[in-house]
Image (cartoon, helix red, strand yellow):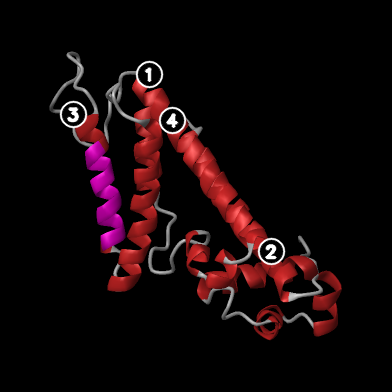
Amino acid sequence: MILVGSREQLVDAMSDLLWERGYAATSPRAVRERCGIGQGSMYYHFPSKRDLGAAAVEHNCRALLPGTIAILEGPGSPLERLIAYLSRDDHQPLKGCKVGRLTQDPEVVADPALLAPVKVAFAATHGMLAGVISEAITAGELPSGLNADHLADMMSTTIQGGYVLAIAAGDRAPFDNARAGAVDLLRALAPTSPSQDPTVPEGHLT
């Protein structure tokens, strides 16, 4: 059995509350009540809410990357990996993105130390997406005239904007529709190879 220390429990609790309420609306008391850690232990590990918040923001940003890396650096052609990234099913649209929603919190945006891990996480994702798009262009799966950075930003914006639309609608459909639209666009951009069978169904790229 793995025992989780009080520091990790505090970070986990703060991470969840950041996702549910945001930084400004989360009090140290709410964190203690969530994880059952006493005030003394909390301030032993984190002298201030900002210290705990910084650790939790870093935690949430680090958690964003492994799934992205597994898909974008995983098996399949570059185009297949891009479509897999857009189609992944581990999102919770009605709760929002653990990292993206931090950019809507004025206290996070106003504090460079809190915002820095968010910038790093999004920059890392952008770099991976742009790299795979460049691979797809080199492989002839996407047109040579495409700008990899522009398309990477469009894909990230589609996902983050999809969260906003889903939350506003109280329905995950806008999130799923936005991603499906981006997949449709990638398929439409992909040049048709002379050897490609036009009857191959979607989801079975050759």
Which x, y percent locates residue 63? 59, 53
Q: Secondary structure at mark 3?
A: loop
Q: Is residue 197 above or below residue 107?
A: above
Q: Is residue 77 visible?
A: no
Q: Earlier in the sequence, mark 1 or mark 3?
A: 1
Q: Earlier in the sequence, mark 2 or mark 4?
A: 2
Q: Position of residue 149 (x, y in %)?
A: 41, 35
The range drawn in magenta is 174-185
| Residues tagged 2 and 1 counted as in contact (Cβ below 8 A) | no
Q: Amino acid at mark 1?
A: Thr
Crowding at mark 3 (Cα within 10 Å: few <14, some 14-19, many 20+): few
- Residue type at mark 4 is Val
Q: Is residue 171 visible?
A: yes
Percent coordinates x, y for residue 82 in the rendering: 38, 36
Task: Please give the label number shown on residue 200.
Answer: 3
Query: What's under tag 2, amino acid-wise?
Result: Ala
- Is residue 42 toward the left or the right of residue 117 in the image? right
Q: Is residue 112 left or right of residue 175?
A: right
